[in-house]
Amino acid sequence: MIEEAALSTNDGDTSLQDGSLAKILDFFGVSWCRLAVSALLADNDTRSLPGVRLLCSSDVFSELIANVQQNPSRLQQWRQRVHSVFVYAGDDTGAFARAVKLLGRNGTFNDGESYTGRILIAKDFSEFCGVMAGVSIDGDAVNIGSNFVPTDRNSSNEIMSTKDGTVFWKIEYENVPVFMCGAKSIVDMDCELADGIFDVRNHLVQAVPIVLYIRWAFANTSWVAPEHNACLIIDDPLLKPTYGFVEFRELLFLMRRYKFSTNIAFIPWNWRRSAPQVAQLFRENPDYFSVSVHGCAHTRGEFGDDSSERLYGKTKQALKQMEWHESATGISHDHVMVFPQGVFSEMAMTVLKRTRLIAAVNNDTISSDSIPPSITIADVWDIAIMSYYNFPLFTRRYPWQGIENFAFDSLLGKPVLIVIHHDFCRGHCAQLVDFVEKLNGLARPLSWRSLGEAVRRSCRQQVLSADLVQVEMYASELRLENRLERPRQFLVKKRECDPESIKEVRVRNQQLLWERAGAGIQFALEIGGRESVVIQIRYHRLSDEEAITESLTCRARTMIRRYLCELRDNYLHKLSPSSDGKSR
Ligand SMILES: [Zn+2]
C-alpha cells in the first residue's frame, strides 16, 4: 500500500508552516517528500506516484489550480495522480479567497481570531472525523483563522462549522477531494507547553483538521493505536461501603447500567482498613472495579523527593503494603502508580522503572525538579510521555476539561483516563453518569477496562507489509493481539535510554532475544492467528541497601495527616455545596 505525502511549496521555498506540517507527518510515521509546484504534475514528473496526498498553503494551492486549469494535460494528471489535498489558509488571506474562488465557491471571509461561540464537528463525516464526529466545542476567544461564509451555504460540505460559516470544509474538484482549512498556522509539535497540558480548545483549527486529514488519508500506513480504551479513576477512597460521596454498591450498579469501569487509586497505607463486603464486590467484579497504587502514605510531595534511596524505600513499602492488602482481601492490584497530589520527580520515575510497576498515571506532566525537562506538544500527543528515563507517564484529565479533549486524546490513540475525587459522586453520581453518557456517545465506542489493562494495551502500530507489523510499546508490559486469522510477525520497539538496566524480555514464559536499535531496543516475535500475548520487559531491581525505611517521627506525622484527610472527605465536604472534582 502506497500512501505518499507531498508537501507542495513555491519553488524551493520552505515556510515555517510547512516545517510544522513536516513535523506532524513525521510524528504519525508518514513518509513524505517536498515538491515544488513547477515539478508537481509536470509532464516529466517521475517523483510523484499515483495516489499522492498533497499538503500545502493556499498561495501554493491557488498557483497549482491556476496551472491545472490552463493546461489540459495537467488536469488529466491531477485526476489520475492526486488522491486528495489538504490546504490551509496561511498568512495570505487573499490567496485563500483566490483558491476558494478558483474552486468555484463564492462567499466572504471573516477573521475569527477571537471567535466566541460554538464550533461543531460534523456528524455526517464519521468516516473522516472518527471519534471527533458530532463533538461540539464552546469556543471562548478561540483563534479560528479564516471563517468562510459561503453565499450558498451547504452544510453537507462543512466538517467544522461556526454559527455563520465554516473553518474546515471539503470540496470535490475534478474528482479529487480538497480539504480547505481556515488555519493561518499549523500546530508546532516542538512547541513547549508551559503547564505541560495540551488543551485542544487552544489549538482547535491549528490541530484538529490536520490530524483528521492524516488519520483519514494515511489510515493504512501511519502509526495507529489498535484499541481505544478508557477508565475512570477515583483518587483516595478507602474501601468502605461509603467513602465521602462514593457508595460502592451504587457505583457498581451505575457501572453496569451505564457501561464504564472504575479504578480506585488506593493509598497503600490504608491496606488494613478495607471492609470485607467491599472487598468482595471488587473480587467478584474485576471488569468493573480495579485498584492502583496511589503513592505510599499520601504525604505531601512524597514522590517529589530527589533521593533515590528514600524513593526506593517508599516504593518498596507501598508495594509491600499492596501485597499485604491482596493477602488480606483477595483484591489484586494493577501495577500502576498514580502520584499523590500529582507530584513526582525525575528520580521517582527512574526508581519506579526498576520495580514491578509498569507505568505511572498523572494529571501533571512536569516534574517537581528544580530544572524539569521541557514538555512539548509531541510529548503529550504521544501514547504516553517518555521524557522521564523512558518510564511511561500516561496522562489523565478532569471532566471539566471537556469531552472534546477526551475525544482528541482518543483520536491520537491515547487511553481515555478520567480522574475525579469522591465529591464528583455527589447527588448519587448524577454528574458522573451525565459525563460517562457523553463519553459513551462518542462516534467511536470506548472499551472500558481496568487501569492496568488500559495501560497494558496501549501502544501504536504501523503496518509495514501484509505479514509484518511494527509496534511501539510504552509500559513495561504490553498485551499484543493478532486480529487476523493467520499468523503474523511483529517487530516491537521500545524507547530505552538505559538498555543495561534490562534484565530480560519475556513472552509466554520464555526469554526473547532483543537488540539495541537507535534510541531504544527491538525484538521480533510471531503471534498466531487470533492469538494474544503479554510481553514483559523486566529490569534489574535496585539493591535493598538502597532503601531507607521511614523514621518513627515520619510515621506519626503520616498517621495524623491521613486521619485529617478522611475527616475532610467524609464530613466537611459533605456539608459544602460545590464539587469540581479537582485534586488535592
Ligand atoms: Zn490523592
Image (tube, rainbow, N blue to C red):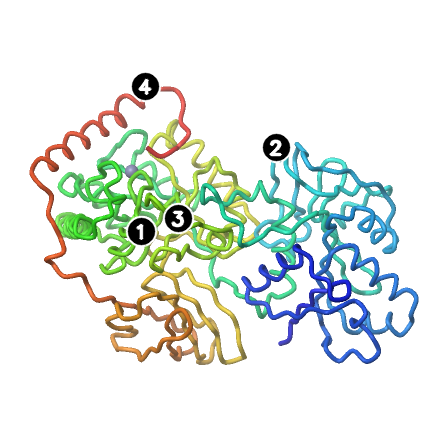
Q: Quadrant of residue 419?
A: top left
Viewer-proximal residue, 300 or 177? 300
User: Vertically, is 146 above or below 173?
Assistant: above
Whichever of callouts 3 and 2 sits on the residue coming sooner in the sequence is: 2
Q: Position of residue 266 (x, y in %)?
A: 25, 43
Residue visible at 41% across and 60% down in the picture: 458
Q: Nearer the viewer, residue 291 or 294?
A: 294
Labels 4 and 1: the sequence-earlier one: 1
Q: Which residue is mark 1?
A: 346
Of the four image quadrants, the one with ligand 1 is: top left
Q: Which residue is mark 3?
A: 231
CB of residue at label 3: within 8 Å of ligand 1?
no
First in sequence: mark 4 vs mark 3 = 3
Identify the amino acid type marked 2: Asp
Q: Residues within 10 Å of mark 4 (few under 14, many from 20)?
A: few
Q: Amino acid at mark 4?
A: Leu
Labelled pair 4, 3 in contact (Cβ < 8 Å):
no
Between 222 and 157, which is closer to the camera in this rendering? 222
Percent x, y for residue 508? Answer: 28, 74
Which residue matches tag 4? 575
| Residue 408 position in % (x across, y down) | 54, 49
Q: Is residue 561 left or right of residue 235?
A: left
